Image (cartoon, helix red, strand yellow):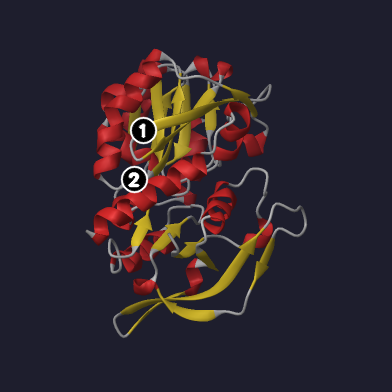
Amino acid sequence: MSLLVAIQMDPIDGIDIDADSTFVMAMEAQARGCRVYHYLTQDLAFDHGRVMAHARPLELRRAHGDHFTLGDAEWIDLALADVVLMRQDPPFDMAYITATHLLEHIHPRTLVVNDPVQVRNAPEKLFVTHFPELMPPTLITSNRDKIAAFREEHRDLIVKPLFGNGGAGVFHLPPGDENLNALMEMFTELYREPVIIQAYLPEVREGDKRIILVDGEAVGAINRVPADGEARSNMHVGGTPLKSELTGREKEICHAIGPALKERGMIFVGIDVIGDYMTEINVTSPTGIQEINRFDGIKIEAMIWDAIESRLDIVEE
C-alpha cells in the first residue's frame, strides 16, 4: 500500500535512533513504500479552510550521525495525505491542544494517529482517572486543606505537575519530609493547574513497567528500574530497562482498558504500571518500542502499521 504519510514531530536531527519510537515507525512506513514527510507543529497552518503543513520529504537510515535526509520544504494539504502521525513530545500545553484542533478538521478521512479529539480529551494523568479501580490513591487539587488531609491519610507521597512529562517535576515526599508546603508554593508559581498527588508505591523500587498496547491489545512490556537514590524510573534520568513479561494483574488492567482505547481510536498507547496499579495512560507520544523489540525479538512498529492499514481499509469502505 503506497501511502502519503506526514509525521508531525520534534526536529529529526536531535533524536536518539537507538531509542526513539517515531524513528522506527517512520522506518517501517518507508520500508512499506510510503512517501514520508516531516514537519514541526509550528509548520502547521489553517489557510482558507485547509489544514496545511510546510513539510519536507524524509528519508531515514539507521546510521549514527547520518540518519536522515530532508528534501526541500513544500506546502502540503494534509487532507490529501493518507496518514498523519502526531508524534511531537509533550508538554501538553496550549500549543499541543491547538494542533489537535487543527488536525481535527482532516480526521478521519486523513487518519490521524492517535485520534486528535481523543488525544485532547485524554491527557496522561487525567485519562487514567476514568479507571479509578486500577489506579493508586490519588488526589488532584490545589486546595491546601485537601492536600493536608491526603498527607495525613497516606503520609508517603508522590507529588507531580498535572501536565508534566518525562519525570520532570516529580517529587517523593516520605513521612516526615517538611518540604510539602514549600513545594506547593513553587508549583503555584509555576503552574495554574492543580497538582496530582498519589500514595507512594514502594513497589517502584522493583520497577515501573511500560506496557505497549496496539489497537487495544497488549503487545509487549519493559520494566524500568530506578537508579539508587532516585524515585523516578524514566530511562533518561537513569532508569535501567529490563526484559519483562506481563503479570496476571497487568493482563487484567490491559483487558479492562483495551476496549476503551480501541473505541477512541487510540492505536498506539503506552501505560505505566507500578505493582498492582496503573499510574498513567500515555496517548500523546508513547515510547519504549525499540527496547521491547530488542528484548523480545519482535517488531512493534510493524504491528502499529498493520493496525493503521486496517483502519484505512475501514475508512475507504
**Residue topped by disc 1:** 217
Q: Residues within 10 Å of mark 2 (few under 14, many from 20)?
A: many
The picture quadrant where one finds residue 70 is bottom right
Mark 1 or mark 2: name the one nearer the start of the chain: 1
The picture quadrant where one finds residue 166 is top right
Which residue is rendered at x = 53% and y = 35% of the image?
170
Which residue is rendered at x = 51% and y = 15% of the image?
203
Looking at the rendered structure, the kind of residue marked 1 is Glu
Mark nearer the viewer, 1 or 2: 1
Foreground of the two, 313 or 52? 313
Residue that lies at the very extreme toward the front in this rendered image: 1
Residue that lies at the very extreme toward the right in this rendered image: 65
Are dots 1 and 2 in contact, CB under 8 Å? no
Q: Secondary structure at mark 2?
A: loop
Q: Is residue 94 above or below residue 270?
A: below
Looking at the rendered structure, the kind of residue marked 2 is Met
Q: Position of residue 20 (x, y in %)?
A: 60, 47
Residue 271 visible (yes or no): yes
Foreground of the two, 206 or 62? 62
Question: What is the C-alpha distance between the residues marked 1 and 2?
Answer: 11 Å
Q: Secondary structure at mark 1?
A: strand
Which residue is rendered at x = 32% and y = 56% of the image?
312
**Residue topped by disc 2:** 266
The picture quadrant where one finds residue 46 is bottom left
Foreground of the two, 154 or 215? 215
Q: Is residue 19 above or below residue 138?
A: below
Q: Position of residue 207 (x, y in %)?
A: 56, 21
Q: Quadrant of the N terminus?
A: bottom left
Q: Is residue 35 above or below residue 271?
A: below
